[in-house]
Image (cartoon, rainbow, N blue to C red):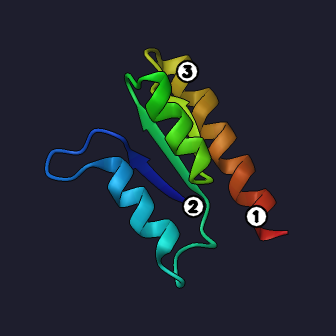
Amino acid sequence: MILLDLHLPKYDGLQVLKTIVEAPPLRHILVLMMTGIASPAEEGQIVGLGALYRKKPNSLDGYLQLAAEIVALCKKSRS
């Protein structure tokens, strides 16, 4: 799994996602894109490119739930 932020300091996260999806050695890897804020159009692009989208949590409990989801997704992808 690749965890990717939408708003990177030097790169456009959507462009990075497109590059991952178009790269044969990487396209099989699940990408979870996170951000504090995304427009509906950006959310649609993320999902349209086959990635999962999650809003960054704003609490410790939210991060714990996200971490549990990530672990579950990783376990599922192994089977």
Q: Residue 1 shows which numbered tag?
A: 2
Q: Nearer the viewer, residue 42 or 35?
A: 42
Cβ–Cβ under 8 Å for marks 1 and 2: yes
Three-letter residue code for mark 1: Ser
Three-letter residue code for mark 2: Met
Q: Secondary structure at mark 1?
A: helix
Q: Residue 77 shows which numbered tag?
A: 1
Cβ–Cβ under 8 Å for marks 2 and 3: no
Residue tagged 3: 62
Residue drawn where x is 42% and y is 23% of the image:
39
Residue drawn where x is 35% and y is 59% of the image:
16
For this view, does 27 lie left or right of residue 33?
A: right
- Quick one: label 1 or label 2, which is nearer the N terminus? 2
For this view, does 56 lie left or right of residue 30?
A: left
Question: x%, y% of residue 58?
Answer: 43, 15
Residue drawn where x is 36% and y is 43% of the image:
5
- Answer above or below: position of 58 versus 14: above
For this view, does 10 lie left or right of residue 3?
A: left
Q: Secondary structure at mark 2?
A: loop
